[in-house]
Image: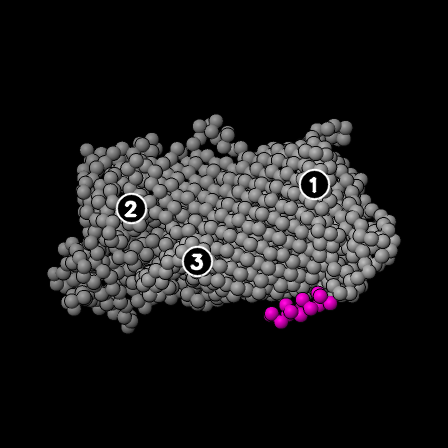
Amino acid sequence: MRYFIITIFAALTLMGCDEPIQLDIDQTPEHIVIEGLVTDIPGRQSVKITRSVGFYDKGKTPRITDALVTVKDDLGEVVTFVHNPRNHADSAGIYIPQSKFTGKVGRTYTLTVDADGQRYEATDLLASVIVMDSLKYQIDEDQEEDPEDEGKIYELLMFAKEPQNQLNWYLFKFYRNDSLTYFNDTDIYYTDDEFLAENISGAESPVYYGKNDVAKVEVYSLSRVGYVFYNDLSTLLNNDGGGMFGPLPSSPRTNLSNGALGFFQVSSVNTSTIKIE
Amino acid sequence: MLRSLLVLTLILISLAARSQEKVTLNGYVKDADNGEELIGVTVYIPQLKAGTVTNDYGFYALTVPKGTYTVQYSYVGYKIQDVTIELQQNVSRNINLPVEAELMQEVVIEEKPLNENVVAVQMSKNTININQVRKLPALFGEIDIIKNIQMLPGVVSAGEGSSAFFVRGGSADQNLILIDEAPVYDPSHLFGLFSVFNADVIKDSEIYKGGIPARFGGRLSSILDVRTKDGNNKHFEGSGGIGSMAARLAVEGPIVKDKASYIVSARRSYVDLFLKAANEDNLVHFYDVNAKINWKHNNSNRFFLAFYTGRDVFSFGNDFGFAWGNMTGTFRWNHLFNEKLFLNTSVIASNFDYKLELKDAINGFEWVSNLQELSVKNDLSYALGTRNELSFGYHLTGRRFSPGEISPTGSSSFFAPQKQQHMYALDHAFYISDLQRVTDRITLDYGVRLSIFQSVGKGDVYLYEDPQDNIKRERTDTLHYDAWETIKSYVNLEPRVGIRYMLKEGQSLKLSYNRMVQNTHLMSAGTVPVPFNTWNPSSYYLRPQVADQIAGGYFRNFMDNQIEFSAEVFYKDIKDVTDFADNAQLFFNKDLSTEYRQGKSWSYGSEWMVSKTRGKLTGMLSYTWSKVMRKIPGVNRGEAFPANHDRRNAINLQMAYDHNDKWTFGATFNYSTGRPFTLSSGKYEYGSYNPDVIVERNSYRLPDFHRLDLSATLNPRKNANRKWKGQWVFSVYNAYNRQNPFTIYTRTKKDDDGNIIGDGTEKEARMIYLFPFLPSVTYNFKF
């Protein structure tokens, strides 16, 4: 909304301009960043632990590889996560369960991370997710006329029944030939069901596809705090800068304790795939 | 507090008892040419060293011992009238002031008596002289009093291209903006590029920044009181103009000569007409319509009916659009019970609404929101002896807040209809104040306003496990209230005191204190409100905001009142200033109360101003230093931070030079410290995103802002002999093309085409500038 208003505003003035500037930024001490995920799909449980860096720093952020990570459910079962057991170079900082472990709908999970002599904790509920009845596709007229990405002119149409008797929150991820795709790099696709009617018949995807692309949609259930986290993160990523029309930028609210950045997400996942022909 | 009320009453009664054996002179003072009543004309009897000024309706009343006096009526821009009046009984005398012969053909109405700056008790007040504003440069040539207000001492803006203004550390929603007494909830066109006030119909506008009179209330920081013209009751005339953005036309004239008149004026932006012709389907336009009928039934009964409507309409393609607008109406009856007692009764309605619409079969919806207000005001003034002028009154206001209603519009829309409950509020205010000339040197203006605010049903109030937990928002119970049932009442007594002490001729010291209470709160967490923000009344969770302000000043006029000087200092303390939690969700939130955070705000500063009001060269130079801080529990970890509009230094210069009867030149210069903003102090990885690390609020500042604008007005000589008088205004905005920062934001480092540079981990900060060097031409006409 805010960024949208700024854009309109800049367009209204017709001649406004937008250019990079170098800021003199006071760097604060590093923060620990935790990106935890527990799902009801085998093999999709992981915890990534990193550190924040300076605004103008280049390259990947530092990984923390010596943390103690456990996930406990509300029945008292504890699973230990170990750091990158297969030693993949690009999996540094990622912890996976030591033993076979899959989340279950209705269970509550608590993450504990001991790192740098500090303890960080988070608890979240694994809620059920909407089930996609079907996926279709059609040509999007605007993209056909003026494609953002050459040849990517098909949009997906999603069909589902939204349960009206409970509060739900969802996160969507769109894949193009197995690669996670966004329309803009700061987009997050999430919603609550407050404004949703029961019959979702043909909700359009924000990501476009070309002929012969394989389109995959993942829907994740979120808890209320998960929705809040992604909403805040989206607001932060798309902030108009120091609260001209929108709120001042601030750190997303999270379920993590002790000042850690990031989030511990616990979700059930529904996946649908279709090939554009 | 009750005790001081009692004392006040006693004083008043004792004064009333003394005022026998006296007679009252009263009447209206009007412009001899068009019959417009003049506000603030000095009426003075030299023999008695007694005098008064005409009120907002052009009416004056003066009680003096029996005798024959020479009464002097003076007003800048008009010939001074000396009238000898024999006062053996009460006398009504209406005065027509002829306009002083001017170089310009244009009628120059200076809106104040010659030395009001020094002698009035009122301090911290500025009059915006619309004819002076016309001589100054304007953005796109569109004259805008709000842009002018932003250049007054003690007032700052958030940046250019915005209609929001901040008075002595107050936030943008703490200004009561009135057009013919009706509140305007959002004064912006095009998100603030222009304001809703069409210069063609403005007669008088005043802003009170401190020492606010008891008859005003409801907002903490300022009152902007804009009055429109009554219409020429002598003969028909018209005026208008075409600028680079909008076209204007106003016509006025008598309905019954000298008795009844009308004025109708309209303004519309026309850029969309060209865009439409060019087959562009992203369109935007705005318009304003003002109309007024004015009927002087007799000297004791006058009626006014004023109407305003304005709207902005945006449409993007054929499917998405939004609009907002204000509509106000004022019915006013001025009645003279007798020579001493003057009544103004007004019935006022105001509506603000906005609408967003997406036309689509599947995700189509319409979102509407509005705020309606109806009020009745009774204001009385009573001349009590030669030394006291009493004002008292009762205002009743009812408001209905409809924060939002969403309805699906498409045939198979997946939106479920949603409605946020309406909120209702009743607001009673009683006030009394006395302007008392204690001695020749000392004049007091003291009074009190009692505000009784009730949040009433029908409505539900949710109780929460923790009312400030905006994540879980766990409701524990719901309280149901029937229609008109009181949900919560807030009673506040607001003392207002001003004192003026005359030093030597042409110099005075003034001191004032006011308490203001605000019970309507804007739900905006940004620096600049947008029309989509909604208002909430004080209620179960939201407490009234209360401001105490003390101000002192030194006032002096030089060179036969041609040059006015003032130096003021102020301190303002706000209790329960309304703010919001970090990451507050203010749009369509049924648990909005969990986002409220109220705390403290304090501001102080000094304002220096020199202005020259007469002669070929006129203008104003001011310097303001001020500081405004906030400390809000639950915001910025509870630590104090500079408010978004904390701009420490501001220098403003406005100048107009009447070169000859053909050319007038104008210039404005503005410098101010950049506004504070919140900046990243690092970044981190989450998924594929690189968000900023945000630690401290408002710890950085945008670079300083400064800009010079120039204008030249040409009145062709042939005007003199014609009914049709044309005028060309050439202006240049940002004459030396300064790139003034509007905002700074961050993003992943990209090239100009939007392609990511490097591996996508690098970020960059970018600054948005709005207006470069920008020339414009406006043609104005009168007939």
Residue occupying the point 67% across, 70% down: B7
Please state, as top left, top right, bottom left or bottom right, where the N terminus of chain B lies in the image: bottom right
Q: Which mark is residue A212?
A: none
Which is nearer the eye, B245 or B18? B18
Dot 1 or dot 3: first in sequence order is 1
Count all numbered tags in the image, as a single digit. 3
Task: Answer yes or no: is residue A6 visible.
Answer: no
- Give me the disc on residue B297: 1
Mark 1 → mark 3, Cα distance in angstroms: 42 Å
Mark 2 — on which chain does it sit? Answer: A
User: Which amino acid lies under the numbered mark 3 shown in the image of this protein?
Assistant: Glu
Badge 3, how many Cα within 10 Å: few under 14, some, many 20+?
some
Neighbour tally class for label 1: few under 14, some 14-19, many 20 plus, Cα within 10 Å: few
> A11 or A204: which is nearer to us?
A204
Local crowd size for mark 2, using a 10 Å CA cut-off: few (<14), some (14–19), many (≥20): many
Q: Is residue A138 magenta?
A: no
